[in-house]
Image (cartoon, helix red, strand yellow):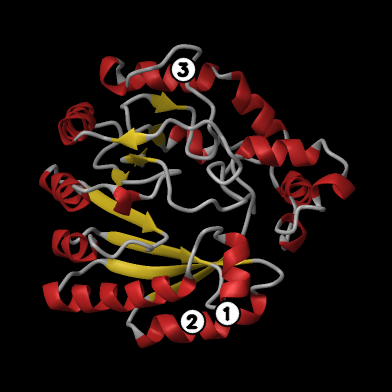
Amino acid sequence: MYAIDVVGGCNLRCPTCPVGQGAALPKGLMQRDLFQAILQKIVHEQAPQRPDIWLFNWGEPLLHPQLGALIGDVRQAGLTSMVSSNLHHSDRIDEVMQANPDRMKVSLSSLRQEAYGLTHVRGDIERVKTNLQLLAQARDRHKATTEIWIGHHLYRHTLQDQQQVQNFAVSLGLGYVPSTAIVAPIETALRMLSTDADEWVAEPLHAQLLTTPAEISSHLKAHRSGRFDCELRFNMTSIQFDGCGTLCCGTTQALASEPVAFLAHSHAALEQKKYAHPFCGQCMQNNLHLTTVDL
């Protein structure tokens, strides 16, 4: 998988995301010629075979004025695509459905503004609901085959909303996938591991987490053999809007002390830089990496 942040920036300020935490992430739009060159390199290197292209990482892809064209570029390259959005912008919904990405996730936590506003700061759930209806209509109008689902983030204060959100998704012919909310990036989770719980739990949203980084780390330590590599390291490459690589899609860590242009380095060279990065050891030592669950 390649997570390509075609937009550096987001309209929301979610507290469990680095954007909402004020991380100094680069802002801008990926130029289409750069995006096409990245796709050409991926296809040429064939590493791995026919990878999946995510047009997002920390940014909101619907902010890109050429998103439909970028999705078309992925299809033209013979690759599959995925878009993930908070769906606050409706002006590109039609062109996105016309471009027919393979998969699209719309993330939300609740259909109640008092709950949604805590997890998606600056967000308006009524606008999202309206745009979901527009999305379903555009899908039908263009006969798009895109697999679309609502990704329901579960917190203590949104567990009660599962049936309501699922019913709304089904009414529009959308899928419903609930998932336990986690803290990102990994740097924040590591800080929470090394901080007294009374300090970070004072944050309103942190107190609503169903499971804390400490609980996740402890559980995974007890169930992992340590034989498996991190999937975000061996199976994914993340790229910023300016074409520079980052360590992985779960962290804001740069790939090296100096910017590393994806186009200027072979797949093997980029992998070498990932595997030499000291942050991976810290993450894996605390069992915050993503890997196969041992049976």
Helix, strand or loop status at disc 2: helix
- Mark 2 = which residue? 166
* Neighbours of disc 1 within 10 Å: few (<14), some (14-19), many (20+): some
Q: Position of residue 87 (x, y in %)?
A: 37, 63
Amino acid bearing label 3: Lys
Amino acid bearing label 1: Gln
Residue at (20%, 69%) from the top-left corner? Answer: 145
Q: Position of residue 165 (x, y in %)?
A: 50, 80
- Mark 1 = which residue? 162
In the rendered image, is residue 32 in sight?
yes
| Picture disc at residue 273 | 3
Disc 1 to disc 2: CB gap under 8 Å = yes
Closer to the N terminus: mark 1 or mark 3? 1
Quarter holding residue 126: bottom left
Residue at (38%, 50%) from the top-left corner? Answer: 60
Left or right: where does residue 112 sit relative to residue 33?
Answer: right
